[in-house]
Image: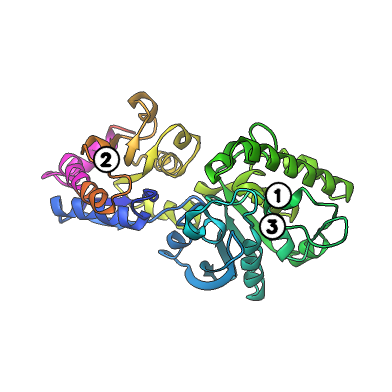
Amino acid sequence: MPSVLIAPDKFKGSLTADAVARAVADGILAASPHTRVTRLALADGGEGSVAAACTGRFRAETVIVTGPTGRPLTASVAIEGRTVLVEASAICGLGVLPDSRTAPLTATSRGIGQAIQYALAGDADTIVLALGGVATTDGGAGLLQSLGAVLARADGTPIGPGGQGLADLHAVDLGEARAALAGVDLVLATDVNNPLLGAQGTAAVYGPQKGAPENDVRELDAALTGFVRRLEAAGVPDAAGLARTAGAGAAGGLGYAGMLLGGRVCSGADYFLSLLGADELLADADFVVTGEGSLDKQSLSGKLPVALARRAQQRGVPVHAVAGRCTLPPERTAAHFRSVRALTDLTDQDCATDSALSAQLLTTYGRALADRWIGGSGEEAVSAARLTLT
């Protein structure tokens, strides 16, 4: 009996990873009912990370925290044993902004620290911060404050929210925040390699996506630069060096705050593949179907479909990819995927925000994939497909 692993990321704005997997599975099983299909919803640290974790061993728990604009917000964290996964986008993300109104200068990460406090109260010894999709550019200042760090103005009062608040920073003491995480493995899961400051820093690269015009980008970068200098003056070890480290600019500087607290950066894609047991499922698969909303240049830098394809290739398992759109030429995708299909090739309609149409097209794709790679010859067709890649 042929065995297929369907393991996509979400199609942002259209379908969750689980919905993508279900739609493709429906098509494969319609064309080849005898196929054994396993679904694995994936995430790489951005939106959907908690949902993906909870399709496996994790369970969701509700927390009430401060949202990006200061309003109370109900979010979920994922828990398995003494490991807690906190999804930044669910707490201070663009998707949870009230009325979708951006606040590039004042959006705060305070709720992330509150979620960490919740995890610590439950005796967590591993806290995973899934970093991506946030509305903030505060260098993680809100997170640090909610864990007890002192970030004060010249008159001793706490600085205001967001990157704008950092412009008033005069005195820093991270002692209480660091003590709170003593003995905890803080994992910073991200595939963003940007430093904190400068032309490739978090404000310059991601600020415009959060509603920051050019003058706000300059203001935010200057405020973050001042933050690093105040930390240096306060004797925080390697404050400037950490700001230059790849990943410090992740999630508006949450990566930097995590590093200041002793956190370690790891590939979000690889971390979640291991966390969700992808290797075990690959060992039993004849071929794999993966995908994401957009296959593009960023995908080749190690995003989920490519990271999964690399693991599959080590086992001689062919990988097929489906995407909402694909901007890569065949010669760029051939090294990773046996075939690539974009939904934009299947319709003239805009399916980027149409979940029903996207699901319908994915089911059509699954049926065609089964006809081509399983078909009437079943296991022989799958075995032949494997042989072409090994």
Amino acid type for the residue under numbered disc 1? Gln
Label placed on residue 301? none
Q: From the viewer's perspective, is 375 left or right of 388?
A: left
Residue 174 in magenta stretch? no
Q: Is residue 319 visible?
A: no
Q: Are marks 3 and 1 in contact (CB under 8 Å)?
A: yes
**Which residue in the protein does label 3 denote?**
161
Give residue 192's quadrant in the image. Answer: top right
Mark 3 touches mark 2? (CB < 8 Å): no
- Secondary element under disc 3, as helix, strand or loop, is loop
Q: Nearer the viewer, residue 100 or 336?
A: 100
Q: Which residue is mark 2?
A: 343
Dot in front, 1 or 2: 1
Q: What residue occupies the far left of the structure in this picture?
A: 376
Type of colouring: rainbow
Which x, y percent locates residue 184? 69, 63
- Taking 294 as reference, is 64 above or below it? below
Which residue occupies 61% across, 35% down?
214
Q: Tell me the residue that label 1 is attached to.
A: 164
Q: Report the magenta residues as a range.
A: 364-387
